Amino acid sequence: MPARKKKSPDRIAIGEDMTIYNAAAHKQQLLDALAGAAERLEIDLSAVTEIDTAGFQLLMLVKREARRLGKQAQIVAHSEAVRELLDFYNMAAEFGDPLLIPAHQA
């Protein structure tokens, strides 16, 4: 019997700011990506230069919706703005995603 190949996770990259001004578009984009993901959705936020409370709420929504669907949503790349926001809200541990800090910022 051939070994089962583990399916690689689906991935989405957000290349724009996650602010109230584009929250509706990002909400639909993230929820559609999660719905289409098999088991796990990786979210790349490395290009996000600005994030506000609306963006934070979207991330919380995606995490909650993933749990409801029995899937995983994991942030795999955090920009400095995203790291600062998670630190400000003291939510890095709650999100449970590994935070990689570039050497030049450590």
Image (cartoon, rainbow, N blue to C red):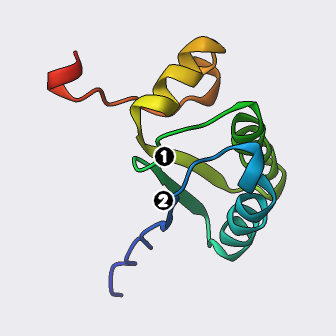
Is residue 77 visible in the rendered image? The answer is yes
Find the distance from the CA under tag 2 to the CA under tag 1: 6 Å
Question: Dividing the image into 4 quarters, which one contains the N terminus?
Answer: bottom left
Check the image and report above or below for 49 versus 41: above
Residue nearest the viewer, comparing 105 with 19? 19
Mark drawn on residue 48: 1
**In the orientation shown, which residue stands out farthest toward the left?**
104
Three-letter amino acid code at the position of disc 2: Gly
Residue 91: which numbered mark, if any?
Answer: none
Locate residue 52: give its quadrant. Answer: top right
Q: Tell me the residue at 37%/77% (across/down).
A: 5
Residue 60 x/y as whole percent: 75, 38
Q: Tell me the residue that label 2 is attached to.
A: 15
Residue 102 vs residue 3, the one in the foreground: 102
17 lies left or right of 64:
left
State the residue at coordinates (70%, 60%).
26
Q: Secondary structure at mark 2?
A: loop
Rendering quarter of residue 80: top left
66 over 28 or under it: above or below: above
Does any portion of residue 66 appear in the rendered image?
no
Taking the image as shown, residue 30 lies to the left or right of residue 13, namely right
Residue at the farthest bottom position: 1
Q: Nearer the viewer, residue 17 or 101?
A: 17
Residue 9 percent across, percent down from the top left: 48, 66
Label 2: few (<14), some (14–19) or many (≥20) C-alpha neighbours in 10 Å: few
